[in-house]
Amino acid sequence: MTKAAKSVYYFGFYLLGLSMLLVFVPNMLLKLFMLEPTEEVWIKVLGAVVFLLGIYYVRTAPTNNEVFIKTTVLNRLLILGWFLLFVILGWGSPFLLLFAGVDVLGAAWTWYELRKGKG
C-alpha cells in the first residue's frame, strides 16, 4: 500500500470510530464542539452514514486506487467549505470548524504523500 493509501486507510478508522460516537454517545461529541445536544435520530443516522464511508475508506485504500485517493482529498477539503457556510448562516457554532480541521489535516497528509510519491 502506498503512503497516500495508508493515510486514507487510517482516516477510515477515524471515521469508523467517529461513527460509533455519533451512534452511541452523540451528545458527548456535540458538547465537545459546543453544539446543542439532541435526542433526535438524525445524529445517529449521520453516524450510520459515516460508518459506511469509513468502510469505503478502509476497504478501498489498499487497492491504491489513485482516483479514489484524490477524491478523498477533495471531499475532506470540501467539508470545511460546508461547515464554514453553516457557521456563516448561523446554523452552527464556529467550533464546527475545529471539527472540520481533522478532515483538512487528513486531506493535507494524503495530498502530501501523493505529491511526494510523484517526486
Image: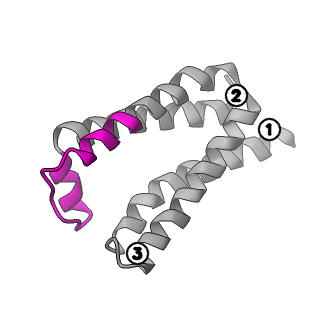
> Few, some or many C-alpha atoms within 10 Å of disc 2 (few <14, some 14-19, many ≥20)?
some
Identify the element where label 2 is drawn.
Answer: loop
Q: In terms of depth relative to the viewer, which is nearer, 75 or 40?
A: 40
Kindly indicate whether the residue at mark 1 contacts the one at mark 2 (C-beta within 8 angstroms).
Answer: yes
Q: Which region is colored magenta?
A: 26-50
Q: Residue furthest left?
A: 39
Residue at position x 17%, y 50% in the image? 40
Tell me which amino acid carries mark 2. Answer: Thr
Identify the element where label 3 is drawn.
Answer: helix
Q: Quadrant of the C terminus?
A: top right
Marks 3/1: CA–CA distance: 36 Å
Give residue 117's mark: 1
Tell me which amino acid carries mark 3. Answer: Val
Whether the magenta-drawn stretch holds residue 101 is answered as no
Q: Which residue is mark 2?
A: 2
Q: In terms of depth relative to the viewer, which is nearer, 17 or 7?
A: 17
